[in-house]
């Protein structure tokens, strides 16, 4: 159900509007002046606010200006009395959604409110969509390691150097790969991702190099592999430490010669692909244990970018929390929740697994369970393990 706040110093007007709008199924709160209105806006989320212009204490224009600062997305409809039409027009210029005149015309009132509600929904949807279509998520962080990573990306992205990204699960290795691609001369080409750990070893070759029809039982038609799909672009080989030795030999050839052969095929196909690989394993140890080819390791690791776990860069936590608050509240279509300093400190002291997804989940949990401002006791209640 949608919440509407009516701010007017005339009780009769509030009563009439409130009756009409409750009848239409809206949930109504009332305030007698701008100051009381501001208090209500702090306490609760409103979909639309109706606000008189001439009021004691804080007038409508001041209320509009203050509310726009903290809640830029709530549509505010000004109620203009006789003699305040010009001010109402001024208010629209300052960001009010629209104005209606006193005494309000019932149809116009309802239509204006409905349009304003539609706008709120659209604004929320657009925000979510904008984020979805924006190609690469921002890499948030102010810690020394993040600065260094960004610097390295700037330097190496425009070259053709192969890059090995190392780090534990969920620390942002894929994000690094995406930024390298985005800032490279191949950005207009494809970025094709293969998670080597997720593909059964007997299928990885066909996944990477494609296959000809009939080359094995389930190969019912020809298939183009990821190397070919990434031609002119970048191939991101995630979890490369899990690749079988036979597939490694073929990847090595592709890197050395710039050629691949489809499974069951006899033709060499030229491919122009830049490879970025990532792993959470210690590849040199894998080499020692004969699970990984040393020559492939050297081919892949011209540049090594290590992404440290969240525990090693706790300085990034405030910025990441801030970003997740904005993102998640945007996804939910609710006003952004605040978080106080002590709560942030408590989050910084927490012993994280290192995976950024864990921090995101925690922020989402706090948004759902806490009030308008997330406090230290929310963190203690909902995040930290009970003693
Ligand atoms: N610095 C950052 N700023 C903002 N979001 C980040 C940052 N680093 C990682 N993330 C987000 O955290 C999530 C995990 O990151 P990503 O998938 O890049 O990690 P990964 O190390 O490749 O994970 P895996 O080991 O599971 O493949 C993603 O949603 C990503 O957008």
Image (spheres, rainbow, N blue to C red):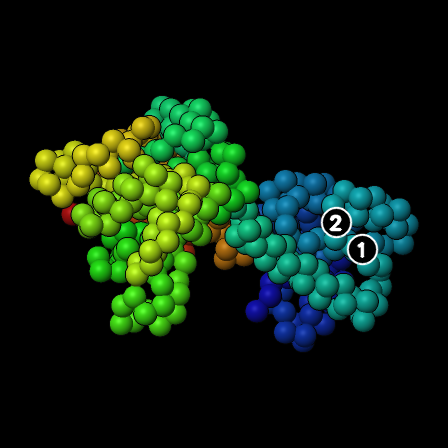
Q: Which numbered dot is residue 118?
A: none
Q: Report the disc number at residue 96.
A: 2
Q: Residue at x 30, y 58 (%)?
A: 263
- Vertical relation: 72 (above or below) 28: above
In percent of the image, x 34 and y 33: which residue is there? 163
Q: Nearer the viewer, residue 211 or 237?
A: 211
Image quadrant where residue 217 sits: bottom left
Residue at 39 percent across and 62 percent down: it is 223
The residue positioned 74% from the left and 45% from the top of the image is 95
Q: CA distance from mark 2 to mark 1?
A: 8 Å
The extreme front residue here reads 266
Whether residue 93 is visible to the viewer of this picture, yes or no, is: yes
Instruction: Count how many numbered circles sit on residues in the image.
Output: 2
Crowd band around label 2 with a 10 angstrom C-alpha radius: few (<14), some (14–19), many (20+)? many
Judged left or right of residue 280, residue 32 is right
Pointer 1 residue: 99
| Residue 305: x %, y % from top left | 32, 30
Across and down, in percent, residue 167 comes to: 26, 37
Q: In the image, is 205 to the left or to the right of 82?
A: left
Does residue 306 appear in this view?
Answer: no
**Residue 254, horizontal then vertical, whole percent:** 33, 43
| The one of 134 and 47 positioned closer to us in this rendering | 134
Crowding at mark 1 (Cα within 10 Å: few <14, some 14-19, many 20+): many
Residue 332 at what x, y percent from top left?
50, 57
Taking the view exactly as shown, the residue that stands out farthest to the left is 289
- Secondary structure of residue under mark 1: strand
Whether residues under marks 2 and 1 lie with C-beta atoms below 8 angstroms apart, the answer is yes
Q: State which quadrant residue 68 falls in.
A: top right
Element type at mark 2 = loop
């Amino acid at each position: 159900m949608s919440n509407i706040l009516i701010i007017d110093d005339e009780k009769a007007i509030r009563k009439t509007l409130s009756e009409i709008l409750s009848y239409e199924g809206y949930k109504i709160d009332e305030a007698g002046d701008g100051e009381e209105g501001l208090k209500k806006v702090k306490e609760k989320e409103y979909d639309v606010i109706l606000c008189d212009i001439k009021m004691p204490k804080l007038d409508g224009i001041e209320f509009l200006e203050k509310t726009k600062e903290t809640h830029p997305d709530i549509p505010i409809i000004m109620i203009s009395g006789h003699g305040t039409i010009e001010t109402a027009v001024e208010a629209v210029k300052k960001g009010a959604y629209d104005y209606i005149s006193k005494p309000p015309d019932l149809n116009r009132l309802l239509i204006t409110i409905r349009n304003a509600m539609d706008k709120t929904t659209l604004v929320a949807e657009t925000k979510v969509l904008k984020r979805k279509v924006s190609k690469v998520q921002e890499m948030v962080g102010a810690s020394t390691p993040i600065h260094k990573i960004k610097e390295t990306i700037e330097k190496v992205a425009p070259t053709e150097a192969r890059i090995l990204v190392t780090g534990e699960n969920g620390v942002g290795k894929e994000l690094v790969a995406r930024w390298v691609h985005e800032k490279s001369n191949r950005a207009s080409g494809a970025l094709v991702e293969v998670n080597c750990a997720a593909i059964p070893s007997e299928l990885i070759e066909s996944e990477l190099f494609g296959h000809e029809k009939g080359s094995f039982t389930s190969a019912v038609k020809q298939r183009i592999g990821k190397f070919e799909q990434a031609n002119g672009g970048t191939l991101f080989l995630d979890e490369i430490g899990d690749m079988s030795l036979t597939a490694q030999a073929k990847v090595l050839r592709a890197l050395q010669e710039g050629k691949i052969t489809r499974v069951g095929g006899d033709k060499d196909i030229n491919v122009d692909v830049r490879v970025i690989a990532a792993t959470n394993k210690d590849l040199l140890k894998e080499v020692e244990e004969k699970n990984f080819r040393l020559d492939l390791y050297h081919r892949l690791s011209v540049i090594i970018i290590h992404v440290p776990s969240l525990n090693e860069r706790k300085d990034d936590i405030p910025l990441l929390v801030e970003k997740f608050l904005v993102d998640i509240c945007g996804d939910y279509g609710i006003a952004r929740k605040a978080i106080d300093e002590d709560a942030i400190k408590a989050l910084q002291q927490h012993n994280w697994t290192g995976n950024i997804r864990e921090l995101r989940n925690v922020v989402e949990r706090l948004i759902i369970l806490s009030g308008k401002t997330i406090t230290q006791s929310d963190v203690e209640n909902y995040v930290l393990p009970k003693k």
